[in-house]
Image (cartoon, rainbow, N blue to C red):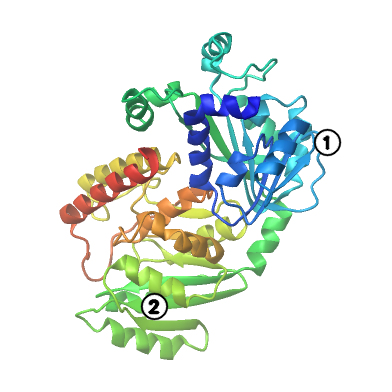
């Protein structure tokens, strides 16, 4: 066993925690570049389709090549690296702390990015500097000189200077040594808690390429759109869903999924399709399963558009506002647009005070769980690209079929993929036909159970 491997074995719990973090965000069988690949264990752990590691230490490159021959390791300095391909993910596990020229390295890395590439960096919390230096003196940690001790603001600024924007961040690991009983208590249960989380050793950032405004406008004009409208007992709203629909991008497709209504909703959907079918591309189907989540998934399966939009057929969110959602996602300014009803004034008729408080609570809880600021988690209007929806669907086994509403399923899936999530303000109005299908107390309990389940799968893993 080499000296490098001995240090890894000495602090194996720390290294495995880093690997677990990257495994959570990196989808298997992706094209992955690791900058500062060391002896190759991290790159191997994310199971890449194409895996390339670069390192400026010839001994590490030689050792990693011997151990993981199915991966490619190159003797390269990040500051001199000139990539000849683009990757789905670029990993930098503590690498930014060792670079002599961070801006040049990030500039080179930027060349290996496509619009969907996620750059994932980990680095030590600067508050641990003295602790780690003391650990080095005690020979509990590999001796390293002249580290860059950067905080979150430093790294965000450096990324921004080279055309990369932060879309996610977090902290983990309170106790890097595996002490029986204490290790799990500190790292699984205490480390994720608010305030305590600020004390953690490992910080991480997820970044992506900033959107070019000229390219963004071209994407808006060239993208197609599918609007999925689940409808149950909404006969009086069906025609307005079509007549008030704005034209979105190059082509707009409207998909009605009728959910076993007790009124004449299905008859009205067929009438509207016949009357407006020459002006609009309207597809219709009756739901095979139960629940809004099932209806949305059925509509997504039928959709042919580049951008997928969910519009509730009660029209409490105005169809006219969908243009803001479409442009945000089609342009690339965000990757998941989440409707927010809590910006503009609300009447008690459209959302009673108690419902408002419940929405704020669930928004806070979701923001905490996902490490992403969300002001309103329960608005039914959500938008993402079809490409990213398919990635969420492929990855659905991680969370399982836990969500009858469909909203949390999409939010949790987007967070796990590291998508950029943004709130889009909507003007929320009272319904003009029918009554709500929501059973507030019963479904509130279901939402709480889903949040607890997500906490286990995301925060307290």
Disc number placed over residue 336 in the picture, else none? none
Instruction: Using the image, determine if residue 348 lies above or below residue 401.
Output: above
Q: Camera-side residue: 147 or 248?
A: 147
Q: Residue 396 vs residue 346: left or right?
A: right
| Whether residue 449 can be seen here | yes
SS state under label 1: loop
Q: Residue 441 vs residue 456: left or right?
A: left
Q: Position of residue 379 (x, y in %)?
A: 36, 55
Q: Nearer the viewer, mark 2 or mark 1?
A: 1
Disc number placed over residue 256 in the picture, else none? 2
| Whether residue 56 can be seen here | no
Q: Camera-side residue: 311 or 126?
A: 126
Comes first in the chain, label 2 or label 1: 1
Q: Position of residue 75 (x, y in %)?
A: 79, 38
Few, some or many C-alpha atoms within 10 Å of disc 2 (few <14, some 14-19, many ≥20)?
A: many
What residue do we see at 72% from left, 57% from top? 215
Q: Position of residue 84 (x, y in %)?
A: 80, 51
Give the labeled residue for mark 1. 80
Locate residue 233: give its quadrant. bottom left
The Cα atoms of the two marked residues, 2 and 1, are separated by 54 Å
Locate residue 55: give its quadrant. top right
Few, some or many C-alpha atoms within 10 Å of disc 1 (few <14, some 14-19, many ≥20)?
A: few
What residue do we see at 50% from left, 72% from top? 226
């Amino acid at each position: 066993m080499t000296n490098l491997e001995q240090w890894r074995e000495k602090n194996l719990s720390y290294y495995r925690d880093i690997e677990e973090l990257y495994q959570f965000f990196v989808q298997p069988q992706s094209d992955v570049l690791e900058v500062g690949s060391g002896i190759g264990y991290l790159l191997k752990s994310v199971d890449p389709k194409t895996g390339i590691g670069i390192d400026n230490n010839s001994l590490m490159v030689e050792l990693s090549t011997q151990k993981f021959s199915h991966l490619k390791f190159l003797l390269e300095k990040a500051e001199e690296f000139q990539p000849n391909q683009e990757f789905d993910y670029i990993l930098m596990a503590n690498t930014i702390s060792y670079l002599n020229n961070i801006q040049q390295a990030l500039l080179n890395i930027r060349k290996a990015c496509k619009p969907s590439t996620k750059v994932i960096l980990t680095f030590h919390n600067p508050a641990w500097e003295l602790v780690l230096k003391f650990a080095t003196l005690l020979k509990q940690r590999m001796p390293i000189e002249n580290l860059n001790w950067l905080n979150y603001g430093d790294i965000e600024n450096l990324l921004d200077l080279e055309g990369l924007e932060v879309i996610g961040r977090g902290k983990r690991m309170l106790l890097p040594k595996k002490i029986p009983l204490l290790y799990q208590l500190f790292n699984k249960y205490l480390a994720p808690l608010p305030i305590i989380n600020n004390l953690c050793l490992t910080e991480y950032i997820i970044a992506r390429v900033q959107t070019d405004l000229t390219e963004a406008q071209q994407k808006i004009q060239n993208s197609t759109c599918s609007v999925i409208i689940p409808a149950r007992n909404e006969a009086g709203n069906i025609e307005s869903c079509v007549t008030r629909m704005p034209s979105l991008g190059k082509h707009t497709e409207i998909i009605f999924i009728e959910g076993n209504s007790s009124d004449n909703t299905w008859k009205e959907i067929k009438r509207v399709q016949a009357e407006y079918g020459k002006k609009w591309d309207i597809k219709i189907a009756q739901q095979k399963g139960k629940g809004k989540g099932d209806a949305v998934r059925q509509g997504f399966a039928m959709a042919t558009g580049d951008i997928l939009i969910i519009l509730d057929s009660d029209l409490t969110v105005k169809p006219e506002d969908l243009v803001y959602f479409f442009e945000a996602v089609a342009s690339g300014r965000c990757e998941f647009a989440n409707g927010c009803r809590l910006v503009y004034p609300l009447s008690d008729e459209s959302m009673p005070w108690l419902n408002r408080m419940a929405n704020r609570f669930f928004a806070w809880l979701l923001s905490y769980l996902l490490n992403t600021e969300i002001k309103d988690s329960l608005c039914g209007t959500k938008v993402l690209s079809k490409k990213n929806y398919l990635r969420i669907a492929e990855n659905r086994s991680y969370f399982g079929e836990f969500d009858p509403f469909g909203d949390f399923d999409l939010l949790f899936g987007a967070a796990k993929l590291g998508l950029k999530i943004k709130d889009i303000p909507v003007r929320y109005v009272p319904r003009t036909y029918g009554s709500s299908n929501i059973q507030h107390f019963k479904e509130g309990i279901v939402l709480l159970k889903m949040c607890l389940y997500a906490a286990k799968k995301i925060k307290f893993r």
